[in-house]
Amino acid sequence: MSSQYYYLDIETSTELNALTVRRSIEVAAKSIFGECGAAELNVDVLRSEGRRALLRVHEEKLRKLWAALTLAASELRVLKHSPSLQALI
């Protein structure tokens, strides 16, 4: 049985709360994909502590999220990713 979600453990350049992480991803996605493309990208911030955050995204949107993280102005770096949440905790 495969998971329909992917989980990403990311690190930020500065301490950010869950709302700021989500907003950074949204701004980066809008700059790449425009309003409509960014609206399709539903990312859940499951946890945000210090400079680390745990994200959940539907497997079909993983590439879009990865592109947004790569081009985000606030420097968001993927440390680990997995289709299983248990692998990241």
Image (spheres, rainbow, N blue to C red):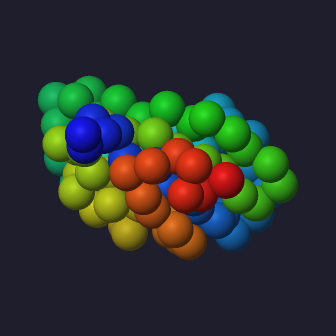
Q: Is residue 64 above or below residue 42?
A: below
Is residue 39 in sight in this rendering? yes
- The percent coordinates of residue 45 (x first, y second) are 57, 36
Image: 81 above or below 55: below
**Quarter assignment of residue 88:** bottom right
Q: Is residue 22 above or below residue 78?
A: above
> In the image, is residue 6 above or below residue 43?
below
Tally of marks: 0
Q: Quadrant of residue 46?
A: top right
Whole-percent x and y of residue 1? 24, 40
- Furthest-front residue in view? 1
Q: Position of residue 87 (x, y in %)?
A: 55, 58
Task: Specify whether residue 26 is in view.
Answer: no
Residue at the spot 64% in from the left edge and 65% down from the top edge? 11
Query: Could you tell me which residue is drawn at 72 percent across and 44 percent down?
Result: 48
Q: Is residue 44 left or right of residue 49?
A: left
Q: Residue at x 16, y 29 (%)?
A: 36
Q: Nearer the viewer, residue 28 or 4?
A: 4
- Taking 18 as reference, is 41 left or right? left
Q: Which x, y percent locates residue 55?
A: 52, 44
